[in-house]
Image: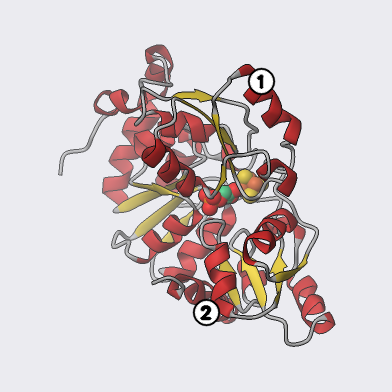
Amino acid sequence: MTTLTAADLYPKVAHVVPAVEWATMADDVDAIMRLKQERNAVILAHNYMTPEIFHGVSDIVGDSLALAREAIDVEADVIVLAGVHFMAETAKLLNPSKTVLIPDLRSGCSLAESITPEDVRALRAANPGVPVVTYVNTSAAVKAESDICCTSGNAVKVIESLGVPKVIMIPDRFLAANVARQTGVEVIVHPGACEVHERFTPNDIRQVRLENPGITVLAHPECPPEVVDEADYAGSTAQMVKFVDAKRPLKVALITECSMSDNVSEAYPDIEFIRPCNLCPHMKRNTLAVIRHALETMTNEVTVPEDVADRARLAVERMLAVGK
Ligand code: 13P
Ligand code: SF4
């Protein structure tokens, strides 16, 4: 198989990366493309990766749900998860024989860090018999204490699949509140939030509408409910792409992480993307340099202790079985 070079890949990023900037990235891009072949590795990249990673060096891209599903079928020996730590753990849970690397071990998540296994056990003890639905943005140890996982792309379906009037939904209080409104199921919450999405305000959206009459506004369900109320649609990052593809609005604002618009706009040159956005410092730890380093040195492997993995895998697999 021929290895694509930085020159071959440039047209995919030309809409957002100036040629002079790409020239400074070419050495890392070429090295990563070569190392992927040498190591028999694939790069799974979340939608919040910068365009040189998302369009340039990655093999599979998507939202949290898609990356989890795709990880199962990876045949290569090595998975590099260009995203955050919980995503790498989920890939390891679902394809345990592979070596899973994270480019920077410090790529955390404010949601994952907001809750411990002890917190989950305390919630269970205080609410006997109420099932625990855990957002994938958590550690494997927290997943191991849960009945079932969900992502922002399937949270409503997962809750409805349980057929119960009340759930413990952790750790994102805003996602839980948004889902409660959509399902009518009572949710017991934990006070976690995404540091990117909690910062948006209803006024941000009103301002965008004022400055861009007729604009379509899509918000991520990790945003506070009063922000979602101001939007035309709320959905996971993949659901936002689907919406844009189906409706083809002339102007759109994606109320989420900043790289999202850069990545989606490549396929839709006729759509104007207005960019009120917040950066995720954890996602932004992923750079070409650290991806190259991880592949060169085969360091930053993500593993999950077997007893935790077995229980956490069950919660993730129950989620994946919903809607199949
Ligand atoms: P999704 O891509 O599943 O919508 O998740 C967004 C997010 O914040 C991941 O960290
Ligand atoms: Fe976590 Fe929010 Fe960053 Fe996603 S965007 S990794 S939920 S802090």
Residue 242 appears in the picture as rendered: yes
User: Where does residue 250 sit, x and y in percent of width and height?
Assistant: 44, 25
Name the element at disc 2.
helix
Quick one: label 2, few (<14), some, or many (20+) residues within 10 Å?
Answer: some
Q: Residue at x 39, y 70 (%)?
A: 97
> Residue tagged by mark 1?
210
Q: Is residue 146 above or below residue 7?
A: below
Residue 32 placement, left or right of 239: left
Q: Is residue 69 above or below residue 267?
A: below
Q: Is residue 184 above or below residue 299?
A: below
Amino acid bearing label 2? Leu
Q: Residue at x 67, y 67 (%)?
A: 184
Instruction: Establish whether ligand 2 lies closer than 8 Å to the Cβ of label 1.
Output: no
User: Where does residue 222 sit, x and y in percent of width and height?
Assistant: 66, 49
- Image quadrant in which you'd find residue 191: bottom right
Nearest to N terminus: mark 2 or mark 1: 1
Q: Nearer the viewer, residue 99 or 56?
A: 56
